Amino acid sequence: MTNGATQTHAVTPIGEVRWRAPARIRGRVRSLRVQPWADVATLEAVVVDDTGGLVLVFLGRRRVAGLELGRTVIASGMVGQSRGYLAILNPTLELVAAATAS
């Protein structure tokens, strides 16, 4: 039996995610911007890995603590579409700790 605290959850390469399917992805934040969405400011983060890119959309948010350019994140949610791109709306977000040099 595996302890839930130490169990690792698989991530899907971004290039393999599919529309209308749940996904858990890991990638680096390539860009951030605030865009209006139905007159509400919305943060959009483009996250990339070696296989592709995906947009994370945070409705009604101008910023998310710890989310910054170059940061590696793990995001989970249902894959949909935003402005013609695959996107996860209001994802569950995990910030990956930066590696430290010894």
Image: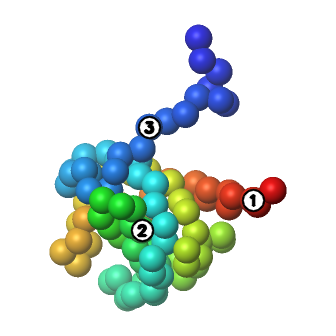
- Mark 2, secondary structure of its residue: strand
> Which numbered disc flags the more N-terminal residue, 2 or 3?
3
Image location (x, y in percent) of residue 31: 45, 81
Q: Which residue is drawn at 69% across and 58% down?
A: 99
Q: Residue at x 30, y 64 (%)?
A: 52
Amino acid type for the residue under numbered disc 3: Ala
Q: Mark 2 points at which residue?
A: 47
- Mark 3, secondary structure of its residue: loop
Taking the image as shown, residue 51 lies to the left or right of residue 60, namely left
> Which numbered disc flags the more N-terminal residue, 1 or 3?
3
> Is residue 60 something that shows in the picture?
no
Q: Mark 1 points at which residue?
A: 100
Q: Which residue is drawn at 59% across and 11% down?
A: 1
How far apart marks 2 and 1 lie (CA) works out to 22 Å
Taking the image as shown, residue 70 lies to the left or right of residue 102, namely left
Q: Residue 10 — which label? A: 3
